[in-house]
Amino acid sequence: MNTANLISLIHLLAGIFSPFLFCSWSLSGSEQFALRYADGPQLYITEQSRGDIKNGTILRLAISPVSKLCHGGDSSRIQSHGIDARLEALKELAKLSADPTFATEFINMEGIGTLARLVESGTHFGEMLAFTLTAFLELMDHGIVSWDLISLSFIKQIAGYVNQPMVDVSILQRSLAILESMVLNSHSLYHRVAQEITVGQLIGHLQVSNQEIQTYAIALINALFLKAPEDRRTLLFQHVIRGNRPIKAEMAHQLYVLQVLTFNLLEERMMTKMDPNDQAQRDIIFELRRIAFDGENDPTGTEKRKAMYTKDYKMLGFTNHVNPAMDFTQTPPGMLALDNMLYLAKVHQDTYIRIVLENSSREDKHECPFGRCAIELTRMLCEILQYHVIVTQSNEGCNDYHPMFFTHDRAWEEFFCVCIQLLNKTWKEMRATAEDFNKVMQVVREQITRALAMKPSSIDQLKNKLRGLNYSEILRLRQSERMSQDDFQSPPIIELRERIQPEILELIKQQRLNRLCEGSCFRKLGNRRRQEKFWFCRLSLNHKVLHYGDLDESPQGEVPFELLSDKIPVSDIKSVVTGKDCPHMKEKSALKQNKEVLELAFSVLYDPDETLNFVAPNKYEYCIWTDGLCALLGREMGSDLTRSDLDTLISMEMKLRLLDLENITIPEAPPPVPKEPSSYNFTYNYS
């Protein structure tokens, strides 16, 4: 049969869900069989997809999963009375539902309705219910069936799982995902779900430690907000933001706290420029000045200080001393920076006054400008968190998740307050001046980024992690990471490493030989009933002879050569063997030894056909002696200890040699050779 005929035959057999005849194979009931790919995802083949079969593809004849799971009789397993059979069937169904071919046929046989009735019955619990919900969600995600067909009783049942105080995590996760899909895919289902689920109940799921549950709960909040009418959104905000308290202007910051998809109000604050002619906005800046310098609000004192406002604004660290409102005209951060500064001044007044007065009273050019720092820090935080943190599964551009934003009613503002104190502290540690502003901001960005990467669960944990990331620690981390960066894979660095390696290996070799000269005590293997005996072995100082002898007890220090009666010339040693290759490990009695003894055993083979058998007291001595003996024989030292020592010493030596090249770009290639001079008249004529 040629290739074309073979492919035609495969295509003929590929209509797996339509009746076909396998007469030559003596197979009856063709609708009970199916063809599937043998490799990869092992998808099933239909009449529509059979044209995609490539030449050389291996196919497998299998029992049709739809027939096996859904047909009547003994094969109707998903409705079987046997619990074990039903559980296995639902488990298989959950796995197969991702296959679009299977999903199409299963849905055509009214499989969705069957699963919905199983859920509505309320008779499934635990794993059985989890697999049922997984299969239902997978089948609906193919978009074959409209979500509008879902019944109210099904919605009530799924909502009941979300509202239950104690429910299995897997069931809760799938229930939240199903409700989210209902809301996003059907306007009519939104109203039904909104009647069954309150935002307050969803917020309760944000307090659990399971991050996936928190993520799915937020995703459902996002979906409810997106589909909610404008007036309904206001009520939603009242539940989410303020716990039914009136909404205020700063509720945009709380949206950030909850990391909700609807970040538009927060973004609006970031993208709103300050109007220098807006008296209400100017009053906020005046309030910052008053809290810092006036203490109590004294109208008389305020009038006397009007001429000093420019000086005060300079001490506050604004770039524009005459009209500081101009500092907030750049977006981002826009008005968001001013909101943050006002929150710090009012809620953490002592901290605010300390930062301002501490820096404004300095005369050594090392003052940290509070206003400029607060504005730039707000912009930096927006960049670090990408303006908004979206945790819905549908968004692939940003999936960062920070649990600490759920632990405080004003977590965004508190986050800013922690970071502005960090900036002031880092400024002092770096002994920075105005010219170093950008350098300080780079260090602070790295400190915040590293701390957020540790996923602190609360603001207090963030503070603790930032305390451990001071300026000196950042320098240490940078130095250690330089070795793994691309710069250290450049040809000059690789060449330097290759030049250093022989020196380091020689150093390790000398250390091993020196340890052999000091000698070690070994335990004799023998009958356990006998008293334990020891023997000692050491290398002569000229590295030419191994001296060894028996001891009555373990020595406390070095054993003199005179007490070691036996010796082996190094020139007579033929090889060193380890583990199972050792003669004393091949004996029957040694086979009973545990694995630890086997890993510590080594032997020296020497002329004429003699052996000296060792069992090291620990892994370190084993590595020292096997390395030292290999070095004596001129062979490579291959123990784990040698590799570790080599990496450590080379790393230290590289850091020392590159110390003077910090912040200098190392070229990939040497500089070009200059052109030859036009003449060599400048050379000295020795004749």
Image (cartoon, helix red, strand yellow):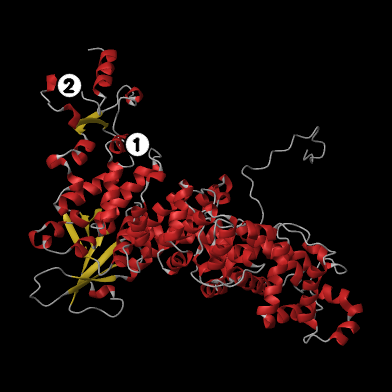
In which image quadrant can residue 29 be found?
A: top left
| Nearer to me, 385 or 409 | 409
| Nearer to me, 335 or 645 | 335
Task: Decide if residue 648 is on the left or right side of residue 472.
Answer: left
Q: Amino acid at mark 2?
A: Leu
Is residue 460 in view from this perspective?
yes
Q: Which of marks 2 and 1 precedes in the sequence?
A: 2
Residue 199 in the image: x percent, y percent?
48, 64
Q: Residues within 10 Å of mark 1 (few under 14, many from 20)?
A: some
As measured in the structure, the alpha-carbon distance from the residue carrying label 1 to the one carrying label 2 is 25 Å
Query: Compared with residue 462, is residue 606 higher up or lower down, i.e. above or below?
Result: above
Q: Amino acid at mark 1?
A: Pro
**Res 517 label:** none
Task: Decide if residue 414 is on the left or right side of residue 280.
Answer: left
- In the picture of the structure, the residue carrying the numbered disc 1 is 100
**Res 21 label:** 2
> What residue lies at 30% left-to-right and 70% top-to-bottom?
519
> What residue lies at 71% left-to-right and 73% top-to-bottom?
342
> What residue lies at 28% left-to-right and 39% top-to-bottom?
110
Determine whether the residue tagged by mark 2 lies in a helix, strand or loop. Answer: loop
Q: Give the position of the C terminus as an image quadrant.
A: top right
Task: Decide if residue 489 is on the left or right side of residue 364.
Answer: left
Asked whether the residues under the numbered discs 1 and 2 touch, taking CB atoms below 8 Å apart as contact, a structural biologist would say no
Query: Compared with residue 410, is residue 496 higher up or lower down, i.e. above or below?
Result: above
Task: Decide if residue 189 is on the left or right side of residue 15.
Answer: right
Q: Give the position of the N terminus as an image quadrant.
A: top left
Residue 113 in the image: x percent, y percent?
29, 44
